[in-house]
Structures are given as C-alpha cells and as structure tokens.
Image (spheres, helix red, strand yellow):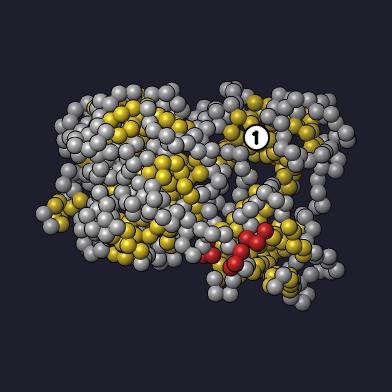
Amino acid sequence: MEPAAQANPHFFFRPPLVRAAAYGGTFDGSLSPEVLVYLGAKPPCPDGVTGVDCPTLVARYGSEGRGANGVRVDASEEHYIANWKPAESLDRSATYRIIVRERGQTLDFLDVSNIKGGTIPIAFRIEHGALDVARAPIGTAGGTIETADGGVALTIPAGALPGATTITVAALELAPGQDNRVIGGTSYEFGPDGTQFSVPVTIRLSYDPANIPDGTSARLLRLHTLVNGSWILVPGSVVDTDDYTVVGQTTHFSTYALLPTSFVSVASGEFHACGLTAAGSAWCWGRNSSSQLGAPTTEICPASDLSSVPVACSTVAVEVAGGHVFQSVEAGNTHTCGVTQAGDIYCWGGNPFGQLGNGNLVTQPVPVLVETPHTFRAVSAEYGQTCALSTAGEVFCWGRNNQLQLGSPSPQTCGTQPCSTVPLRVSIPAASHIDVGLVHACARTTVGDIYCWGWNALGQIGTGSTSAPVSPTHVNGGPWASVSAGAMHTCGIKDTGAAYCWGSSFNMGTIGNGTKSASFTPAAVAGNLSFAQIDATNGNYVFTHSCGVTTAGIAYCWGANRDGALGLSGLAPETCTWGNFPSFDCSSVPIAVTTSLTFGYVTAGLGFTCGYATTGEAYCWGRNDNGQHGNGSLTGSRTPVRVQTAP
C-alpha cells in the first residue's frame, strides 16, 4: 500500500513495502530514526497518554539497536532499514500502521495489511529537508490562552520567556467535510509547529451552546488536538456548562478544537444499554424501572408485550451520577456495573439478590462501591448475578445462586434464593476474560481454556450433556480467544478466528451452524468467517440471537429476527415458529447487518442489538419499546440508528 497523500516530500518508503519512487533530493544518512508498528490504521496517542482508544504498539526499532533489533543505514542503497518479525500471535489480515520518527517528529507513515510470515524489511529514504524546525522549549512558566466573543488572548507571566519569541494564534476554518464534529466549525492554531512550553499552558476555549449539534450534550465537550490529521483527546480537559468553556492543559503548540467525546464502548442489557466516553463517563438509556440507568429520569414508557405496566425510562442517553471515571461499564437485567480506572467496581440499580455486591439488598439509584479489597479490570452483569475479573486474574461472583451460577455454594439466602451479597472466589485457573449469561457464566483462562458453571438444562455449559455441574467445568475444543455466555447458549472464538456456539437454538438458528437444532458441544458457526468478537444474547427471552464482528469490521447476526435484532433492511431468509406466537423470520447462518458502518464490536440484548462503530459512535437496532435505541423515540428499527445524548 502506498503512503498517505500528505506524505513528507523528502521522505520515501522503499520496496518491498511500496513500488519504487522517484527521488528529488540528497540522501541524509546522519540521522537516528526509529520505526514503530501499531495495530490499526489510526495515529498513536501523544506520548504519555494511554486509554482504551489508543492503538497497540506491536514492534519498535531504534538506531541504538543494531542488526535484527535496530534501524541501520545502508549507504550504498541510500536508505535506512529495519527488519520486522511479526509475532505468530498477530492477526495477519489486520491493518498495521508503520511510523518513522526522528527526534520525536513523525516523518511519515504507511498502512499495511495482509502481512506475510517471516521477516518484513521496512526500508525508507530520508532526504535533507525532511525535518521541520527543531523542537525547542520557549517558556519557563505556564500561561493562559483564552477565546471569547471571537477573539483569542494569550497571557504569559512576566519573565517566563528567555527572550523575544514570536507566538501566533489563529482561528482556522476547516475545509468542508474535514471534520464536521468541531463545535462551530472553528479550530485554533497556536504558534509555529515544532515548539513547546517547558511547563504546561492552560488553554480555555469558549463555545456557543447554539452551535452544539442536535443529539449531543454539552457535557460531552472536551479539548482535542490535531495529530497526523486526526483529533486526539487532551487528557484531563473538562467542560464548564455554566460559562460555556472547556479547559485543558498542554505543553505543546498545536492546533486545538472543541469536539464532543465519543463513545469508546457500548454494552446491552435486557431492556437498557450503556456507553462509555473517552473521558471515562458512563451514559445509559432505556428502561429505568429499577434505577439501572444510574440517574433519575422523567420519561414513562408504555406497557408492551414484555411489560404489563408503564415503566420509567429514558429514550436518550443520560449520564450516570457520581462523577466516577470508568474504564468499562456493563449492563445487566435490572442493574449495571462499571470498573473505574483505579480498579474499583461500582454497581447501581436493582439488588434483590445482592447483585450490587455491597453487602445488602437495597436498590441503589446511584453507583455504590462493591465491598472487596481486590482491584479489578473487568466486570459482567446479568439477571441477578455479577462476576468480575481481578487484576491478578482471579474471578469473583456475587448475587443470585439458585443454579450455582456463582461457581460454588453460597452462605446466604435472599428471600427464598441462595445468594451472596459480597464477592465469592470462583475456583478456576488464572483468567483473562469473564462473561455472565442468564443463569450461567464462563471465563477464558490465560492459556486459552474455557470454564463454564451454573445452569446447564439446555447444554449451555458445553459438556456434551444437560447434567448440572457442581463446579466450573472445562469446555473442550480450544485454544479459545474469547467466550460469551448468553441466555440459553454460549459462543466462543478460537485463536484462528473461527466462531463456535453451543446450547439451545430454540428452533431459531441461534447456534449459527446452518440448523435450528441444539448442540451440547461447540458447533462451528457457518460461513468460514474470521471473527474478532462475538456476543450471545442475554436476557430472559425465547427469541434469541447472536452477533459478531469480523476482523474486517463487518457486523453479522443470526437467529431470531422477530424484533429486527439481526439488523436487516429486509426479512431474514428463513421462517421460524415458537409456541403460539405467529411465525417470524430468522436465519440459521450469519447475515451481514445492513449498514455502511464498520464496527469495533457488537453486543446483543433482549430483542435488540447495539454496536460501537469505528466512527466512535454507538448505534442500536431491533426492539425499542423502552428506548433501547437511545435515539429519542420508541419506534423500533431493523437497521442501525445512532444513540443520542441528553442535553
């Protein structure tokens, strides 16, 4: 693949990565470049910044490392070269970004995909003139940059600068279509490229609330900086909706603008869903009958075929109370949980079985801390049950335990049900992934094994029978890359990308193997697709489905389409029946969701599905009787619609 259009005119990638190019300058062999390889075709985050939206660094070569581990100059060929040896575990079909830097400055980059095995030579030519003005600190104290009423003011404390320094501030109108998310269409460029303050400068940009797009909350506005043509969140920036400003700190002269923070993840529950922004705030929408949205709402959704009475709800996303900074959030049936960046778990909503983990059975309208001395990196919630994965790889569960879904007998009773109001350790090897289904749970271990426990009347544990296990049971067929526990079935992805499902299909093709029959052991999902992620329907509902995203970002779904949960503009190709219900359309094989969007992943709820699009927005489709789409209406959609946020 050829370099991007904005390629440095004095920098050239060489064969075999690209075709030979015509050179126009003098080779500069005196430099010490470094080569970085990232997973994904997007720019890396600024130095020192980490987060869920930062691409993964998979290889790095510097001039200090010689031979196979470094970048060397070939004077005879007039180029530099590094030998990239991709790890065997890397996805060969994925896209990788190769970046060449010199003294912290990016000279150019190249996106490559469908990489081969063995060593890949990364050869490139740097000519005189490729480097910009040397980066130099120009300040010894912080300053303030403010915008107001169309003007810009730059204030630097007396004596902060060592001498006369030219600093320019300009308002830039972006070209049409360059980025329509910039509030007001204006960005600001501060100073010449390549300079920086030696201590942080406070930037305060104002905004006009009238310019905020419909469906976007002012509380989502944050400061962003332009890096390699993409807007990157400035960490720590905050919005003040009273005086219409956003404040952040930076040490670099760059181009800044105000953009709404986008969702970086989305999770579907039974009747509600939640999203997480890049700033770590959680937003939820849908049914709020048990305070599972984590914020008060005033809307009432009417009775439906799954609700005999009207219920509290919100048809747009509302921000979860408490001001916590989350790294992940998971929606269950009547409760929701999230893991903070500090590794604490907070839960909120219904609590009849102790599923909030705070030692009592009281419903909580705002997040409460799970009582445990451990730190966590993941949590999963469903019907009356919660499980979590600690940073040490240990699995803990709490809540309802009528089918040993907590992994062992529990010491308490909640009403008439066995339960635990505090976390209990599950006896399995060190784990890397956890997922809770309706009345069972599964975990993937660090060596690629899957263990499942709990209800097995429909074969969802994957042991080959419907006998109830007394402890976590190993699932054959690995090694596995991931697992998803659903309502009546379970799905997993092998290291090869092949998807498998097991359990009940309810005569709806939920297993995805081309039949409508159940399978008590892992059955291959039809289509020979390579999946990056898969999700089995949660929720106490017979019209079940499954969805997944391929390594190319294409969303596929299969199973019941009675509510439009498969995301198709038309009908699914098969007809299914259940009980006394009228017949409905379904599919026993994966069908691509009708959309031009690509997705990072999808999450299947009760009769609806949500997905995190690579555009950074959340979309939902299927049932919408409780506002599950978060688009301000109660009208269902068989194709994806964008989630809106409360004003």
Q: Report crowding for label 1: few under 14, some 14 to 19, many 20 or more residues within 10 A (C-alpha).
A: many
Q: In the rendered picture of this protein, how many numbered marks are placed on residues?
A: 1
Quadrant of the image occupied by residue 503 = top left
Q: Which residue is mark 1?
A: 111
* Residue 21 image point, x, y percent: 80, 28
* Residue 210 image point, x, y percent: 60, 67
Quadrant of the image occupied by residue 525 = top left
In this rendering, the answer to whether 273 lies above or below 510 is: below
Q: Is 586 or 480 nearer to us in this picture? A: 586
Q: Is 431 or 279 nearer to us in this picture? A: 279
Label 1 amino acid?
A: Asp
In this rendering, the answer to whether 382 lies above or below 253 is: above
Can residue 413 be seen here?
yes
In which quadrant will I find the N terminus? top right
* Residue 627 image point, x, y percent: 37, 54
Q: Residue at x 82, y 38 (%)?
A: 10
* Residue 217 image point, x, y percent: 51, 62
Q: Residue at x 70, y 59 (%)?
A: 187
Asked if residue 381 lies left or right of residue 360, the reply is: right
Q: Residue at x 30, y 23 (%)?
A: 515
Q: Is 160 or 301 nearer to us in this picture? A: 301
Q: Is 365 or 401 nearer to us in this picture? A: 365
Q: Quick one: SS at disc 1? A: strand
Can residue 446 be seen here?
no
